[in-house]
Amino acid sequence: MISRTTTNLAAPRRRFVLCTHHRLVAGLAWLALMLAAPQVAHAAEFPEKPVRIVIPFPAGAAADTAMRVVARKMSDLWRQPVVIDNRPGAHGFQAVTSAPADGYTLLMGAGSGMVTAPLLSSKLSYNPSRDFVPVGRVVINVPILTTHPSLQVRTVQELIDLARKSPGTLNYSTSGNGSPGHLSMEMFQAATGTRMVQIPYKGGGPAVNELAGGHVQLGINAVPSVAAHIRSAKLVPLAVASAKRSRAFPQVPTMAEAGLKDFEYDIWYALFAPTGTPSDLVHKISKVLKSALVDAEVASLLVAQGAEPAPTTPQELARFMQDDTARWAKLVKERNLKLD
């Protein structure tokens, strides 16, 4: 204990302690800056190693072929390899949610996995809004309604008339319950007052092949999935569901032009990063993605596949997803659609 007689000596001592404290704080702040410096440099120099893009679809799927074109350009711009990692199904999402949030592992998600699946099921192993942050949209694949030639219809109205005449007899193929092909045909039936039968398959490939082979009568699929069959006359295109005609098949009318004014949607794919990825890094990746998509050669290759380059900022993608969610939530409720 300090006695009264040492009070005058204690004051300088307190000043010394306070000065030492300030120097210690300053020193710790300097040390923190020094420790943070490599991290700042690391972010500025991103990427310093290969970047992995996980695709929850098999190799050869529309999403896979489009992303490989874009990834090659991103690799050129970054001067680092961009590796495509196909992990179909839930394993793809889990591979990204469990990865470090450092920008080196990204997900190419689709509207089916990021918007409609959560509306249809409460048992997903991932939560899009919790586990991922938007980076930017990649492409839009125009959905196109096609029929097998044996059905002998050439217009949307002819299909509607036939379906109304014989409810429950026409069948359509999809890549599974809750898939874009399933939901779009539910939308079509709601808009036209028709009733048809879904034949679900395990994947888009089998669904399209069975349609082209005449085992089912119609379906709505992404243009890249059916383009070869349309060109070889194995399938008859009736209309596209997008707001504009497809550049791959400009002669095919839109649903609106065919008489269905409110029938419009797109099959979209976008890049996402794990939650916790620094926002400046997300924007940096987004800018490189956009640069790749606006490249003339990349755009030409994508259009040849039947895909449409559709770059956005992270914020624009987030707003787009909100609108998409509202649209599909209404249909899911009206049609009482569930996967659980």
Image (cartoon, helix red, strand yellow):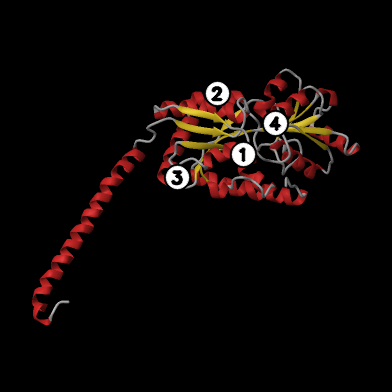
Report the amino acid beneath label 1: Ala
Q: Nearer the viewer, residue 58 or 207?
A: 58
The CA distance from mark 1 to mark 4 is 14 Å
Mark 2 nearby-residue class (10 Å; few <14, some 14–19, many ≥20): some
Q: Residue at x 56, y 40 (%)?
A: 94
The CA distance from mark 1 to mark 3 is 21 Å
Q: Which mark is residue 301?
A: 2
Pick whichever of labels 1 and 3 is earlier in the sequence: 1
Q: Which residue is mark 1?
A: 90
The CA distance from mark 3 to mark 4 is 32 Å
Q: Which residue is mark 3?
A: 277
Which label lies toward us, 1 or 4?
A: 1
Q: Position of residue 186 (x, y in %)?
A: 76, 42
- Relative to 230, 196 lies left or right: right
Which label lies toward us, 1 or 3?
A: 1
Q: What secondary structure is found at the residue carrying circle 4? A: loop
Report the amino acid beneath label 2: Leu
Q: Which residue is mark 4?
A: 203
Pick whichever of labels 2 and 4 is earlier in the sequence: 4
Which label lies toward us, 1 or 2?
A: 1
